Image (spheres, helix red, strand yellow):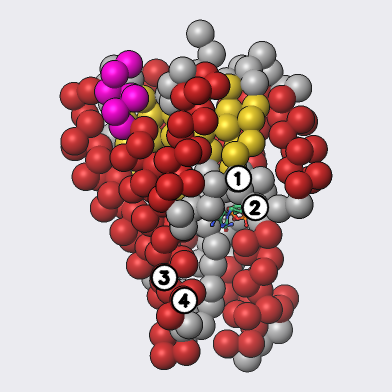
């Protein structure tokens, strides 16, 4: 039977790539995220053609617990359960701590950290019932190391690793694994948008942000690709990964080796 996969924040970037990879292997997929309605529908329809499964869209806002509950409910009503949950939605804000807008801090923590608690609390009972499940949290190299001007992002990403480990211990005997993926820089809209802000905060050019900030510590001097992150998610969701739980896989071109 086809697996059912929910990927938060999958109208763009890494989430869309992960949804694409699961759809291509025949899963039913619920995509989620913001964007223009016609563009989202085009992406959904495109994913729907890739494999034997069905692809649905749900527009839950990851800052709203009741909408998150409805996202999981929708997957259950359409497909019976959730086999794989990918917590991926994210935004970034770059500013010094003393200038960091309070509402931005709250929004980043809600989307990057609390939303995973809400998706998990709604999904875990379903996975316990079927005796299997995979929870994959898209964290970041910033779950392991910090960078200046990204206080909320770094705090939330470090937090999600703690949530990953706790959930893994709670669920280890139920056939459910919980892991995080820690990518380095991937050229997605989230990264493109922070280039001008980082240039301003550091007083350097936008090109220098790419070479001297983003790729400085990435030893390969290359951006990570969306497909590479998606392949890691597929692996963590495979039977071969059943003994991998409560940990993270770094895919950061050597960044956190130093
Ligand atoms: P992106 O901007 O391309 O995609 C983010 C997705 O999240 C979009 O679909 C967007 O609509 C959705 N989203 C934003 N706010 C939302 C909300 N309130 N409710 C529901 N959906 C919402 O960004 P991306 O780079 O693909 O980032 C995806 C994840 O990967 C994030 O968690 C990010 O922190 C992580 N990540 C990205 C990089 C990178 O370099 N791009 C590196 C490490 C980790």
State the residue at coordinates (54%, 47%).
60
Magenta-colored stretch includes residue 104: no
Assess mark 2: CB under 8 A from ligand 1? yes
From where the camera sits, is residue 216 visible?
no
x, y (%) of residue 57?
A: 64, 36
* Label 3 secondary element: helix
Give the quarter of the figure containing the C terminus: bottom left
Query: Given contact means CB atoms under 8 Å apart, are the residues at marks 3 and 4 in contact?
Result: yes
Query: Given contact means CB atoms under 8 Å apart, are the residues at marks 3 and 2 in contact?
Result: no
Residue bearing the label numbered 1: 59
Assess mark 1: CB under 8 A from ligand 1? yes
Residue bearing the label numbered 3: 106
- Residue 34's tag is 2
Q: Earlier in the sequence, mark 4 or mark 2?
A: 2
From where the camera sits, is residue 172 visible?
yes
- Report whether 36 appears left or right of 195: right
- Which portion, as a residue range, is magenta? 124-130
Magenta-colored stretch includes residue 127: yes
* Label 1 secondary element: loop
Q: Earlier in the sequence, mark 1 or mark 4?
A: 1
């Amino acid at each position: 039977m086809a697996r059912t996969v929910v990927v938060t924040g999958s109208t763009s970037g890494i989430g869309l790539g992960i949804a694409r990879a699961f759809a291509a292997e025949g899963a039913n997929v619920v995509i989620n995220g913001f964007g223009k309605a016609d563009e989202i529908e085009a992406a959904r329809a495109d994913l729907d053609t890739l494999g034997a499964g069905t692809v649905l869209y749900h527009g839950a806002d990851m800052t709203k617990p009741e909408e998150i509950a409805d996202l999981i409910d929708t997957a259950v009503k359409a497909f019976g359960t959730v086999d794989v949950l990918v917590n991926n939605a994210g935004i970034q804000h770059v500013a010094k701590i003393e200038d960091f807008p309070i509402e931005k801090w709250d929004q980043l923590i809600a989307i990057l950290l609390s939303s995973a608690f809400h998706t998990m609390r709604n999904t875990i009972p379903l996975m316990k019932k079927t005796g299997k499940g995979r929870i994959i949290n898209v964290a970041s190299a910033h779950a392991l190391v910090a960078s200046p001007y990204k206080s909320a992002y770094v705090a939330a990403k470090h937090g999600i690793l703690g949530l990953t480990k706790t959930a893994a211990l709670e669920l280890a005997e139920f056939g459910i694994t919980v892991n995080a993926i820690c990518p380095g820089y991937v050229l997605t809209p989230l990264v493109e948008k922070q280039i001008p802000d980082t240039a301003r905060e550091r007083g350097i050019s936008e090109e220098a942000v790419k070479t001297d900030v983003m790729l400085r510590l990435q030893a390969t001097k290359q951006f990570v690709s969306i497909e590479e992150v998606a392949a890691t998610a597929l692996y963590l969701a495979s039977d071969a990964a059943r003994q991998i739980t409560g940990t993270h896989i770094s895919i950061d071109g050597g960044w956190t080796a130093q």
